[in-house]
Amino acid sequence: TTVVEDVRNSVSALINSNPIGQSIAISDIVSEVNSIIGVQAVAISSPQYDSQNDVIRINSGEKAFVLDAVSDILVLKID
């Protein structure tokens, strides 16, 4: 697989395994992606991510889910 595919697969797995009603820390996504061999840097463009905004809020009874990793997760690779 390529680094881009590894990133998409890893982020999809993290989000899809998240329990119902549990928010997702964006820093957990960044950490997961940083652990992939070949990744040198990670920047989140959406949702807003900084020290004050580190959570994707999931309401009680809702489930975050990636339906299509290619269209749902944008990965830009700069060589």
Image (cartoon, rainbow, N blue to C red):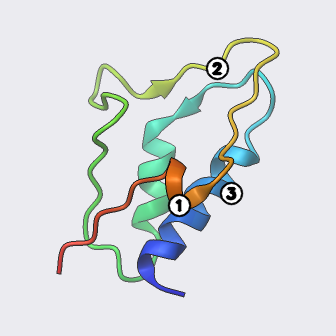
Element type where label 3 sits in the image: helix
Q: Where's residue 21, x and y in %? A: 75, 21
Q: The disc labelled 1 sits on which kind of residue?
A: Val
In front: label 2 or label 1:
1
Above or below, 5 relative to 69: below
Taking the spot 53% from the left edge, 61% from the top edge, the residue there is 70
Q: Nearer the viewer, residue 77 or 41?
A: 77
Q: Which residue position holds label 3?
A: 13
**Residue 3 falls in image quadrant:** bottom left
Identified at 56% across, 55% down, the residue is 11
Mark 1 highlights which residue?
Answer: 70
- In contact (CB < 8 Å): disc 2 and disc 3: no
Labelled pair 2, 1 in contact (Cβ < 8 Å)? no
Q: Nearer the viewer, residue 68 or 46?
A: 68
Count of picture labels? 3
- At 70% across and 40% down in the image, what residue appears? 65
Label whose residue precedes the other's in the sequence (2 or 3)? 3
User: Quick one: quadrant of the C terminus?
Assistant: bottom left
The residue that label 2 is drawn on is 58
| Position of residue 68 measured from the top left corner of the image (x, y, whole percent) | 63, 54
For the residue labelled by badge 1, is the local secondary structure a helix, a strand or a loop? helix
- What residue is rendered at 60% in x and 66% in y? 9
Q: Which numbered circle lies on residue 44?
A: none
Instruction: Give the distance between the C-alpha atoms of the residues marked 2 and 3, in whole angstroms.
Output: 17 Å
Q: Amino acid at mark 2?
A: Ile
Amino acid on which the number 3 mark rests in the picture: Ala
